[in-house]
């Protein structure tokens, strides 16, 4: 009953005309930020942070939060229609863009919208009921546990790749190596920079994603010399009942996965999308279709993306630890308003905490309105002939890349990865495992070094800890099971070839 009372108290603050206006502004701006290739909530919140001085405390926090989770809603649109992703919609390029090529753009966007609503709702329930308890879960994870968790992420390669497993592992390794470019945090030594100063800070995730997916896809379309648009004719949004029944299980699975990974520092939407996709590819009844334009490939990642964005507020507001760069900016917004996020926030500023939680569900309703019924208007620009559209897409890609660091060199790096991504396409190599390795590689190295320092060079620290030991045991069982599957499949193929043909 206390939870219902607290939510009623939160809605009392969230449903004021002033806070409703700021929530709508945040959701709309976030959706637009998600639609534009390359731009993201980090840059937008950075630009708007000074405005919080002149905005009431509750309205400012509600607006900035709306920009963050609103961008998770909108970023699927460019990924599905043009194969130009943001960091949190990389996986949407796999099945979402395949659905677009099959003339199911409307269905893919409806699936992403309704799945995001489900993911956001589940995450809000988790946030409102378990925030004080789940915030302490992050304290249980040490460097060895995070290292084991990253290794579990690498196991997802066999599920994320749409080609052969060997090619997927090779691409993942290339991504890990690319993640090592830059300055070593511990020693300050530059690695793999080839004396280029602009590589001293490493290669940006936006540059790799836009290059390997967006620019590479544009180059491929131009190379085919076919006049095309992302979709043609009428946009059918509503799925049939059998299709709708396929959305719900994947969305619920993604919601649970995203809600959990959103709590952990280093997790969040980027990791959650890969985990949800891997689980769907393993447990879905239609797993054989995933990778070829299946609804599950869009539903699971969209729900996980949105759920992780909401639950990432738990460690910030419960223990005062931001889990990613966007949450660090949100923490700055709290501090600007004289509020210190942490264990005492719920007691001392209950109106802000519960008002922010309640506004997230209000924002969920706003976002469904923006992304489902109005999707035809959002996409009207993409009915322009491709020969006219692609220069604009390239322009926004360049603007988005440049806006991250205000550095022209990033545009050249993105162009280089566009060429590399095009070569991968011509060689039938999937870029999704590369992105997985690029994201997890630096995190794995950082936590591995910390774990080895704490254990004084002993690998037993990974086995002795309950969490890391359990995760490593699960990885071992999966590897054994995978080897057994390959052996049985090879034996079956050999027997089929040995049988005489009649």
Image (cartoon, grey):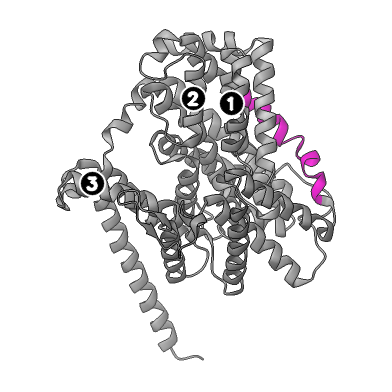
- Marks 3/1 in contact by CB < 8 Å: the verdict is no
- Between the C-alphas of marks 3 and 1, the distance is 36 Å
The residue that mark 2 highlights is 332
Residue 216 visible, this angle: yes
Task: Give the magenta-colored segment's residue range.
Answer: 362-382
Residue 381 inside the magenta-drawn segment: yes
- Provide the secondary structure element on which disc 3 rests: helix
**Residue drawn 69% across and 17% down?**
21
Q: For the residues carrying marks 3 and 2, which lies nearer the camera in this image?
A: 2
- Between the C-alphas of marks 1 and 2, the distance is 8 Å
Residue 175 inside the magenta-drawn segment: no
Q: Residues within 10 Å of mark 3 (few under 14, many from 20)?
A: many
Image quarter of residue 239: top right
Q: How far across and down, in percent of the image, does residue 48 sit?
A: 62, 28
- Marks 1/2 in contact by CB < 8 Å: the verdict is yes
Q: Earlier in the sequence, mark 1 or mark 2?
A: 1
- Between the C-alphas of marks 3 and 2, the distance is 30 Å
Between 237 and 352, the residue placed more toward the observer is 352
The residue that mark 1 highlights is 49
Residue 311: which numbered mark, if any? none
Q: How far across and down, in percent of the image, does residue 493 sit?
A: 42, 79
The residue that mark 3 highlights is 451
**Residue drawn 78% across and 44% down?**
379
Q: Residues within 10 Å of mark 2 (few under 14, many from 20)?
A: some
Q: Earlier in the sequence, mark 3 or mark 2?
A: 2
- Provide the secondary structure element on which disc 2 rests: helix
Between 415 and 312, the residue placed more toward the observer is 415
How many numbered discs, if any? 3
- Marks 3/2 in contact by CB < 8 Å: the verdict is no
Residue 1 visible, this angle: no
């Amino acid at each position: 009953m206390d939870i219902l009372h607290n939510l009623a108290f939160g809605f009392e603050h969230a449903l004021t005309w002033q806070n409703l206006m700021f929530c709508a502004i945040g959701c709309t701006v976030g959706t637009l930020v998600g639609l534009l290739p390359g731009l993201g909530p980090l840059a937008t919140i950075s630009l708007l942070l000074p405005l919080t001085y002149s905005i009431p405390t509750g309205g400012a926090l509600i607006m900035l939060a709306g920009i963050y989770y609103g961008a998770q809603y909108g970023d699927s649109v460019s990924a599905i229609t043009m194969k130009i992703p943001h960091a949190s919609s990389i996986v949407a390029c796999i099945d979402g863009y395949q659905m677009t090529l099959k003339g199911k753009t409307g269905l893919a966007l409806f699936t992403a919208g309704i799945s995001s609503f489900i993911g956001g709702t589940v995450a809000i329930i988790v946030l409102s009921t378990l925030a004080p308890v789940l915030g302490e879960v992050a304290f249980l994870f040490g460097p060895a546990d995070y290292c084991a968790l990253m290794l579990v992420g690498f196991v997802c390669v066999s599920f994320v790749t749409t080609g052969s497993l060997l090619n997927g592992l090779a691409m993942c390794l290339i991504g890990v190596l690319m993640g090592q470019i830059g300055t070593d945090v511990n020693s300050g030594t530059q690695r793999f920079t080839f004396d280029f100063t602009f590589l001293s800070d490493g290669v940006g995730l936006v540059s790799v994603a836009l290059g390997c997916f967006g620019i590479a896809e544009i180059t491929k379309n131009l190379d085919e010399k076919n006049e095309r648009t992302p979709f043609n004719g009428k946009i059918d949004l509503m799925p049939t009942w059998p299709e709708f029944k396929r959305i719900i299980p994947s969305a619920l699975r993604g919601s649970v996965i995203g809600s959990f990974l959103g709590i952990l520092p280093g997790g969040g939407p980027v990791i959650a999308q890969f985990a949800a996709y891997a689980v769907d590819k393993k447990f879905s009844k239609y797993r054989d279709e995933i990778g070829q334009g299946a609804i599950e490939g869009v539903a699971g990642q969209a729900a996980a993306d949105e759920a992780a964005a909401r639950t990432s507020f738990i460690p910030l507001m419960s223990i005062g630890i931001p889990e990613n760069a966007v949450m660090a900016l949100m923490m700055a917004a709290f501090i600007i308003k004289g509020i210190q996020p942490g264990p005492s926030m719920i007691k001392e500023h209950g109106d802000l905490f519960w008002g922010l939680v309640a506004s997230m569900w209000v924002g969920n309703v706003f976002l469904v309105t923006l992304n489902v019924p109005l999707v035809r208007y959002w996409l009207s620009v993409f009915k322009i002939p491709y020969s006219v559209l692609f220069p604009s897409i390239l322009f926004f890609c360049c603007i988005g890349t440049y806006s991250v660091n205000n550095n022209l060199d990033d545009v050249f790096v993105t162009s280089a990865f566009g060429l590399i991504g095009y070569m991968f396409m011509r060689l039938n190599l999937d870029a999704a495992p590369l992105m997985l390795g690029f994201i997890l590689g630096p995190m794995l190295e950082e936590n591995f070094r910390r774990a080895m320092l704490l254990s004084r060079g002993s690998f037993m620290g990974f086995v002795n800890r309950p969490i890391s030991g359990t995760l490593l045991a699960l990885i071992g069982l999966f590897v054994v099971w995978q080897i057994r599957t390959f052996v049985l499949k090879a034996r079956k193929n050999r027997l089929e070839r040995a049988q005489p043909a009649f």
